[in-house]
Amino acid sequence: MIKPVYLNNTMTNTYSRSGYEIQIHWKQTLYTALIAILIIAIISLGFVFFKDWKKKLGNEKQDLAQLWEEAAYDKAFSISGEMLNGKPMDHFLLTVRGFSAYQLAIAQINNYDTQSYIDTCIWSLRKALLVKNGAEDGRLQYVLGKAYYYKGFGYADLAVKFLEEARDASYAAPDIPEYLGLAYASLRDYRSSVASFSLALNPLEISQPLSDDTKDVMYPSDLLFLAIARSYIELNELEAAHAYLMRCVETSRDSKRIMAARLLVGEILRKRGDTKGAERQYAAILTEGGENAEAHYQLGEIYAANNDPTRARAEWRKAIRIDPAHKQARIRLNM
């Protein structure tokens, strides 16, 4: 028999109190254990979530790189832009955004759209360079230089700056000399322009293996012949200019470039006093490319110099009929 115990005039049962304390202790232990388990579970879930999130981000970047390799530039541009909202200083995302913007820019027909993409390209790549603190292999500078060239005449100095930086970083893209030549010509630094074009004409200068996308620029183009000839004309080195213009005529399949080359050849021949040779160039333009206002105007100039005003005025009238805005032909007819 269990005896009752009196404490402060209160009767309690020794057995029942001991059982109650055990019960309370058990509940506290269970509660603590549950809390501990819950904390461990939360930590574990957080770790798993972070791991999955990190893995997912890596996969997104891999997918983005895949889009770039597949030339899906519009998707790469859009997705990189969305991802930059969350990570505005991510070097990889800025690079993809800039590169894809450049590719989209050169594919546009409307000049406004071209310039819009060019601006995005420049903004993204300049920011990418700041993020990496200039530690690059030249690829970003290379695309930036070309982007500034397409931005217009007023940015030729920046085109030269970044293209030279790309070359100094030993990034041997085969069209760097050509773009440098064009940019230097825009700055009227024709000697540097010719020097750069000369490198563009020499495939031995290219040490980096070429991809399928760059093989076509390995060898001189008609546009390159035309550009280097114009620089030589500005330097008054007409013999060299004539030689490159004739190479353009002989190799080009573009009627407009052939026409431009023949017009310049005619100008050089007239300066030499070879009016017959010049006349043949203008006649060839009309035979090969159809009616051309400038060719008729120049023929008129030749006839006027040979004291044949009737034929001269007939040619000038033909020029105006083809191009009513031809200023020089109108001036000649109003004399």
Image (cartoon, rainbow, N blue to C red):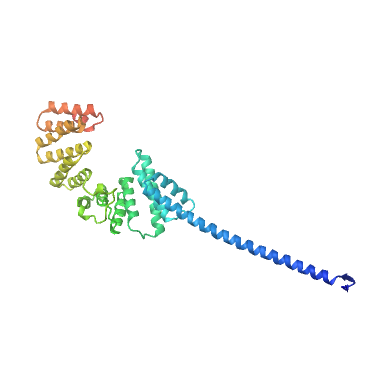
Q: Position of residue 254 (x, y in %)?
A: 22, 38
Q: Height in image: 224 above or below 22?
A: above
In which quadrant will I find the N terminus?
A: bottom right
Say whether residue 125 is left or right of residue 11: left
Of residues 270 and 133, the one drawn nearer to the viewer in this rendering: 133
Q: Is residue 299 above or below residue 247?
A: above
**Left or right relative to 25: residue 123:** left
In this image, 155 relative to 306: left or right? right
Image location of residue 185, percent across then percent down: 24, 48
Residue 228 in percent (x, y) is at 20, 47
Residue projecting furthest to the right = 9
The one of 46 and 195 positioned closer to us in this rendering = 46
Q: Quick check: can you spot residue 7?
A: no
Q: How many marks?
A: 0
* Residue 172: image location, x then y, percent: 27, 55
Q: Which residue is depicted at the point 20% across and 54% down?
A: 204
Evaluate whether residue 106 shows in this view. yes
Q: Quadrant of residue 134?
A: bottom left
202 to 251, vertically: above or below: below
For the C terminus, give its image quadrant. top left
**Quick one: 327 or 78, which is closer to the camera?**
78
Residue located farthest toward the front when viewing the structure as drawn: 1
